[in-house]
Image: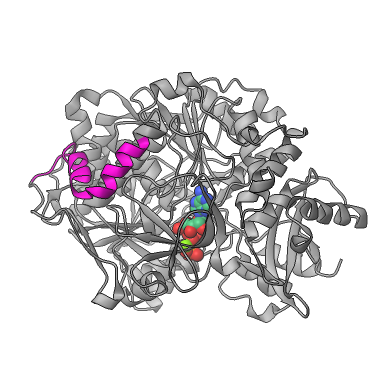
C-alpha cells in the first residue's frame, strides 16, 4: 500500500478509496485487484494475460497481417491493394496522412445488414426499442431493419442525395436514428448526426459547416415528462442557416406520434416532408453504393468540453474493422448476448457502439428513447430485466447520479442476466467503480473502463473482460494495434512507472483522417504538440504493473507548489466523502503556491451546507492524497456545468473560480446554462 501511495499522480488513489467505500481497513494490496472469476475467464474470448500478450504482440509486430485477417471476415466487393496501411504521423515529414485498406471496395451498411441476413440472422432481433413511457416498445429483426434502411435509402436517392453528399440527422433515440445512419452509409452519403438536445444555434452552426442536402428530424420527443418540440428548433436552425448562405432543400420529418400529432406541428410547404408519407412507398431493396475504404463515412463534432467543437471525419474500411473488433473483444461479445449502451447516437459512442460495432457483429441492441430517471431511478434495471440485458455500457456521470439516489432502486430488480459492464466518457472514480461493480453487477461482472475519443473511432485503452485482474479506476492496457506512449513536456517517451502526456505512436484503423474542411487545425491540434505522435490531450500515468490511469485533460493539471496534481485525483478523493455527490476541481492563481486548488462540490440530496462539512471534506482529501492537495476553496454547487454528453466543462469553472465572469466563452454546448448563474450567485457563501 505504501509503495502505491507514493506513485505519481493517479496510481496512488486506489487503496484509500476502497477503504472508504467498503467501510473497512484493507488488509493488503491484493484487495485492490479485482480478479475475474475462473468461470468467466474460462468462457472469455481472451481468457488470460498470456493470450492477450500473444495477440497484442502480433498486432504491433505485424499490424498488416493482423488487420488483414480481420478484414477478410467482412465482405469486400474488391480486395484492397498491396499496402494495408500507409501513414505519415510526423509533421516534420510533410502532410499528416493516414490510409488503411486503400483501394478496397466495400460498404459498411452491407456488412452490418445484408451480410448478417445472408448468414442466417434474418429473424434475429437487431434492435429492441424501448420508448420513453414504460410499456411502449418495439423490435426490428435484421431483415426488417434491412428493409427499412433500403426504403429510406431509395427515398434519399430519389431526392438527389448522392455519394459524398452530407446529410444532417437531428433525431432522438428512435429506431429511425440508426436507420437513417445506415441508409446514408448504404448510398455513400456522409451522415452528420447532431445530438437532438442541441440548440437551434448549435444545429445551424453544424449545418453551415457541412452544407447538407437534407435534414432528417422528427416533430417532437418526450424525455421524461417533458415534451420537446424538435421541429421548432430545426425550423429556427434552418432560418439561421439560410441567413448564413446555406439553404437546405428538404426537411424529412418523422411523425413521433406519442409525443406530438402532426396537426400540431408547424410546417413549411415545399421544404418539409412527413417521413411516413413518403418512405414506406419505396421498395424494400436497394442497390448498395460500393465505396473505397477511404471514402468518408461520417462527420461528427466533438463534445466541446475544451472549446469550439471539432468536425471529426471518419472513413469507411478501417473504422468498420476497428469498431467491430473492439466491440467484440472489449465486451467479450457472444452471439447470445443482449447488449445495451445508454449513449445517444448523437455522440461517437452511439456511432461506434450503438450502431456500427454491434450490428457488424450481428448483435441484438437495446435502443432507449427515454431518461434513466423516468418514471424513477430504477428505469435502467427495469429495462435490463425486461430484455435480459447481458452487456450494459454507460457513463460515470450516470453511475454517480444513480449512486446518489441509493441502492434500493437497483436491488429491487434481479439483474441476473448481466455479465459485463462498461464505462466511458470520463475517468470513473474508484468509489463509483466500486458501486457499479458491487451493487449493479453483484460483484460478478467485469467492468470495461474504455478510454477513447471521438477522434479515435473506437476503444484505445480498455480492459478485456476475463483476461486481466482489474484495478478500480484504471483503464488498464491498450487494445490490439494501439501503442500508447507517455511523454514528458519535451515530447520524450518515458518508460516504466511514470506520469505525463498521453500520445499514440503509429496509426490504428479507426483513427480519424482529418477535421472537416480544416486539415491545418487537425495537424496543429493533434500532431504538432509532440512531433511524431498523435497527441490525445489527456494526461496519464502508468503504475508499476503497467496499468494505465487517465488523469484528466492536460490543460486541467494543477501545479501546486511544484506538485503536479491531476483534477481526476482530487475529485476522486472528494466524492469518496459520503456526503459529497459530485465534484469538479480547477486551478486558480495563488500568491504563494503558484496555483491553488478550487473545488466545486455538489452534496447528496437534501444535505445542508455547513462550515463543519466543508472542513470534513477538506480533511478527506488531506488524508487520502496529502496536505498539498487540500482544496483552498470549496464552492458549493447545486449543479455543475456539463456538456450535453455529461462531461464537466472545467474551462467555465476556471473562469468562475477566477471571477472572470465576462469571459465564460462558448457555452452553447452546455446541457443546462442556468447552472452557471446559480454558481455565480453562490460564489461567496
Ligand atoms: P472536445 O474535444 O470538443 O473538448 P471531448 O474531448 O469531451 O470534447 P469526446 O471525444 O466525446 O469529446 O471525449 C473524449 C475524452 O473523454 C477523452 O479525451 C478523455 O478526456 C475523456 N474520456 C473518455 N473515456 C474515458 C475513460 N474511460 N477514462 C478517462 N477519460 C475518458
Ligand atoms: Mg477531446
Q: Quadrant of the C terminus?
A: bottom right
x%, y% of residue 682? 81, 66
Q: How is this picture coloured?
A: one colour
Q: Nearer the viewer, residue 423 or 479?
A: 479
Left or right, residue 100 beside residue 305: left
Residue 666 in sight in this render: yes
Give the answer, above or below, for where 240 lies relative to 221: below
Left or right, residue 682 beside residue 248: right
Q: Is residue 59 magenta?
A: yes
Q: Quadrant of the N terminus?
A: top right
User: Which residue is found at the position 78% from the left and 61% from the top?
Assistant: 630
Left or right, residue 169 beside residue 61: right
- Quarter of the rendering containing residue 113: top left
x%, y% of residue 553? 54, 63
Q: Nearer the viewer, residue 370 or 652?
A: 652
User: Which residue is found at the position 66% from the left and 39% from the top?
Assistant: 402
Q: Nearer the viewer, residue 56 or 636?
A: 56
Q: Tell me the magenta residue range.
A: 52-77
Left or right, residue 34 beside residue 335: right
Give the answer, above or below, for where 523 lies relative to 636: below
Q: Is residue 271 magenta?
A: no
Amino acid at each position: 500500500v505504501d509503495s502505491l501511495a507514493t506513485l505519481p499522480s493517479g496510481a496512488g488513489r486506489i487503496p484509500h478509496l476502497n477503504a472508504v467505500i467498503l467501510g473497512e481497513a484493507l488488509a493488503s494490496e491484493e484487495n485492490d485487484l479485482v480478479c475475474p472469476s475462473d468461470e468467466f475467464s474460462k468462457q472469455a474470448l481472451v481468457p488470460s494475460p498470456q493470450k492477450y500478450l500473444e495477440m497484442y504482440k502480433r498486432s504491433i509486430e505485424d499490424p498488416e497481417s493482423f488487420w488483414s485477417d480481420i478484414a477478410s471476415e467482412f465482405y469486400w466487393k474488391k480486395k484492397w491493394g498491396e499496402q494495408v496501411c500507409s501513414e505519415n504521423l510526423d509533421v516534420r515529414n510533410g502532410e499528416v496522412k493516414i490510409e488503411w485498406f486503400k483501394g478496397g471496395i466495400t460498404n459498411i451498411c452491407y456488412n452490418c445488414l445484408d451480410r448478417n441476413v445472408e448468414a442466417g440472422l434474418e429473424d434475429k432481433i437487431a434492435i429492441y426499442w424501448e420508448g420513453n413511457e414504460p410499456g411502449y416498445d418495439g423490435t426490428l429483426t435484421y431483415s426488417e431493419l434491412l428493409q427499412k434502411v433500403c426504403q429510406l435509402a431509395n427515398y434519399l436517392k430519389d431526392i438527389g442525395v448522392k455519394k459524398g453528399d452530407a446529410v444532417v440527422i437531428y433525431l432522438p433515440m428512435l429506431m429511425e436514428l440508426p436507420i437513417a445512419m445506415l441508409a446514408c452509409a448504404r448510398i455513400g452519403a456522409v451522415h452528420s448526426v447532431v445530438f437532438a438536445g442541441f440548440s437551434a444555434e448549435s444545429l445551424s452552426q453544424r449545418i453551415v459547416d457541412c452544407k447538407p442536402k437534407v435534414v432528417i428530424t422528427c416533430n417532437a420527443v418526450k424525455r421524461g415528462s417533458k415534451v420537446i418540440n424538435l421541429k421548432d428548433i430545426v425550423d429556427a436552425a434552418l432560418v439561421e442557416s439560410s441567413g448564413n448562405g446555406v439553404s437546405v432543400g428538404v426537411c424529412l420529418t418523422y411523425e413521433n406520434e406519442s409525443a406530438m400529432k402532426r396537426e400540431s406541428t408547424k410546417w413549411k410547404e415545399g421544404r418539409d416532408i412527413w417521413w411516413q408519407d413518403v418512405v414506406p412507398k419505396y421498395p424494400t431493396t436497394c442497390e448498395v453504393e460500393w465505396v473505397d475504404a477511404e471514402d468518408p463515412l461520417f462527420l461528427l463534432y466533438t463534445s466541446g468540453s475544451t472549446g469550439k467543437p471539432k468536425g471529426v471525419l471518419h472513413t469507411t474500411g478501417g473504422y468498420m474493422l476497428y469498431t467491430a473488433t473492439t466491440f467484440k473483444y472489449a465486451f467479450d461479445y457472444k452471439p447470445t448476448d443482449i447488449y445495451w449502451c445508454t449513449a445517444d447516437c448523437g455522440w461517437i459512442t452511439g456511432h461506434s457502439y450503438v450502431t456500427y460495432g454491434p450490428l457488424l457483429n450481428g448483435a441484438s441492441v437495446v435502443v432507449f428513447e427515454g431518461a434513466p430517471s423516468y418514471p424513477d431511478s430504477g428505469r435502467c434495471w427495469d429495462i435490463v430485466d425486461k430484455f435480459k440485458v447481458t452487456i450494459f455500457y454507460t457513463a460515470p456521470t450516470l453511475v454517480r447520479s444513480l449512486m446518489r439516489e441509493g441502492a434500493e432502486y437497483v436491488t429491487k430488480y434481479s439483474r441476473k442476466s448481466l455479465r459485463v459492464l462498461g464505462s466511458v466518457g470520463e475517468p470513473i472514480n474508484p468509489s463509483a467503480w466500486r458501486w457499479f461493480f458491487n451493487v449493479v453487477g453483484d460483484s460478478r461482472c467485469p467492468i470495461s473502463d474504455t478510454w477513447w475519443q471521438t477522434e479515435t473511432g473506437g476503444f484505445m485503452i480498455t480492459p478485456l473482460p476475463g483476461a486481466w485482474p482489474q484495478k478500480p479506476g484504471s483503464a488498464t492496457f491498450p487494445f490490439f494495434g494501439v501503442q500508447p506512449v507517455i511523454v514528458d513536456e519535451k515530447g520524450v517517451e518515458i518508460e516504466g512507472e511514470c506520469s505525463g502526456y498521453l500520445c499514440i505512436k503509429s496509426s490504428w484503423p479507426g483513427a480519424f483522417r482529418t477535421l472537416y474542411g480544416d486539415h491545418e487545425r487537425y495537424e496543429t491540434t493533434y500532431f504538432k504538440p509532440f512531433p511524431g505522435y498523435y497527441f490525445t490531450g489527456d494526461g496519464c500515468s502508468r503504475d508499476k504493473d503497467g496499468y494505465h490511469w487517465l488523469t484528466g485533460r492536460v490543460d486541467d493539471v494543477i501545479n501546486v507548489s511544484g506538485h503536479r496534481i491531476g483534477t481526476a485525483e482530487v475529485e476522486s478523493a472528494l466524492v469518496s466523502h459520503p456526503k459529497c455527490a459530485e465534484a469538479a476541481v480547477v486551478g486558480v492563481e495563488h500568491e504563494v503556491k503558484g496555483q491553488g486548488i478550487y473545488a466545486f462540490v455538489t452534496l447528496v440530496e437534501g444535505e445542508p451546507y455547513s462550515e463543519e462539512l466543508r472542513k470534513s471534506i477538506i480533511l478527506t482529501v488531506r488524508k487520502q492524497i496529502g496536505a498539498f492537495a487540500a482544496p483552498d476553496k470549496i464552492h458549493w454547487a447545486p449543479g455543475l456545468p456539463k456538456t450535453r454528453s455529461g462531461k464537466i466543462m472545467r474551462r467555465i469553472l476556471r473562469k468562475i473560480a477566477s471571477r472572470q465572469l465576462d469571459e465564460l466563452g462558448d457555452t452553447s454546448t452546455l446541457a443546462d446554462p442556468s447552472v452557471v448563474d446559480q454558481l455565480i450567485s453562490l460564489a461567496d457563501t
